[in-house]
Amino acid sequence: MKIGVSSYSYQRLLNQGKTYFEICDHAKKTGFDAIEFTDLNTQNGKGETTQEDLAVSIREYCEKIGLEITAYTIGADLLNGRGCAPAEEPERLMGKLDIAALLGAKIMRHDVFWSMAGFKDWRGAVDKIVPAIREVSDYAAEKGIRTCTENHGLIMQDSERLVYLMRAVDHANYGWLVDMGNFLCADEAPQHAVGIAAPWAVHVHAKDFLFKSGEQEKPEGGWLTTRGGNYLRGTVAGHGVVPVRACVNILKAAGYQGTLSLEFEGMEENLPAIEAGCAYLRKLAQ
């Protein structure tokens, strides 16, 4: 299993003006095998004016320092549209696949929807967007890129709903970005969910959370509310309640050989948290 890191883990530093090239240097120095990028922002480049130019610059730099680019993760809403009409969303995602190809990423994650647009049942919402997902996956296959959807966003977060999505799409080029921490956002036990998700896994996020019961008053500062009314806050991998070791062992037993990618979103200082997460995941992946 390769150990990677999401650029999202460095988001606080990127917001402060660090460049993608600087975080790539840190990732390589820390000992990661690979890095994935969320939707590129030219403000974090070196003067590139388009995402296309920035993608080429990042790919060339990562090739120079020996850091694999494993995935490109994109926000999307095939039911409601994301800055465009819903009918235009597949074409927008195809444009993002072009950028993924310039990066050299072999996986692109896209969301499916963030609100149900009048549907009373999430199954109806899923059925509505299946043709669009297949269209995007067909285009990705032509470029040698595999598409996937992550369990996040509260609606499409737990294993039952993602399994329904996988079976409904039923496309050889489409799979699941399994985020072991995000199942807690739907109040589902990660060990149980990862065992269900493993056959569809094409990419994995390792994430950890602190937990507080909804019987308590919501704590101040950085806590999110789960679908069931409990509270979570991101933390350093290995410091929280997510059974990361058990989840990794489940994935190993299922034959998963992709990247285990750290996604840190805690309040702790970025660089020490990422470094501790890398060391922890490295031990688990052996």
Image (cartoon, grey):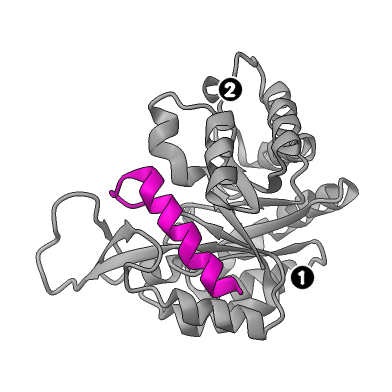
Depicted 1 relative to depicted 275: above or below: below
Magenta stretch: includes residue 276? yes
Tell which circle, 2 or 1, labels the residue nearer the N-terminal end: 2
Q: From mark 2 to mark 1, how far is it between C-alphas? A: 38 Å
Q: Nearer the viewer, residue 248 or 223?
A: 248
Residue under label 2 = 45
Identify which amino acid the numbered label 1 is placed on: Asp
Q: How dense is the environment of label 2, judged by Cα within 10 Å: few (below 14), some, or many (20 and up)?
A: many
Residue 81 appears in the rendering = yes
Q: Are marks 2 and 1 in contact (CB under 8 Å)?
A: no
Query: The magenta stretch spans which residues?
Result: 264-286
Residue 225 on the magenta span = no
Residue at the extreme right of the image, as rendered:
142
Query: Residue lying furthest left in this view?
Result: 217
Residue at mark 1: 170
Relative to 61, is 23 on the left or the right?
left
Q: Secondary structure at mark 2?
A: loop
Q: Which residue corresponds to the image point at 46% horizontal and 74% vertical from the top-left?
A: 244
In the drawing, does residue 206 fall left or right of residue 269? right
Camera-nearest residue between 216 and 276 = 276
Is the magenta region chiefly helix, strand or loop?
helix
Q: Is residue 244 above or below residue 261?
A: below
Q: Nearer the viewer, residue 220 or 269?
A: 269
Q: Could you tell me residue 160's position as x and y percent?
A: 53, 78
Q: Which mark is residue 101?
A: none
Residue 4: image x %, image y %?
Answer: 60, 55
Kind of residue sitting beneath label 2: Gly
Quadrant housing the C terminus: bottom right
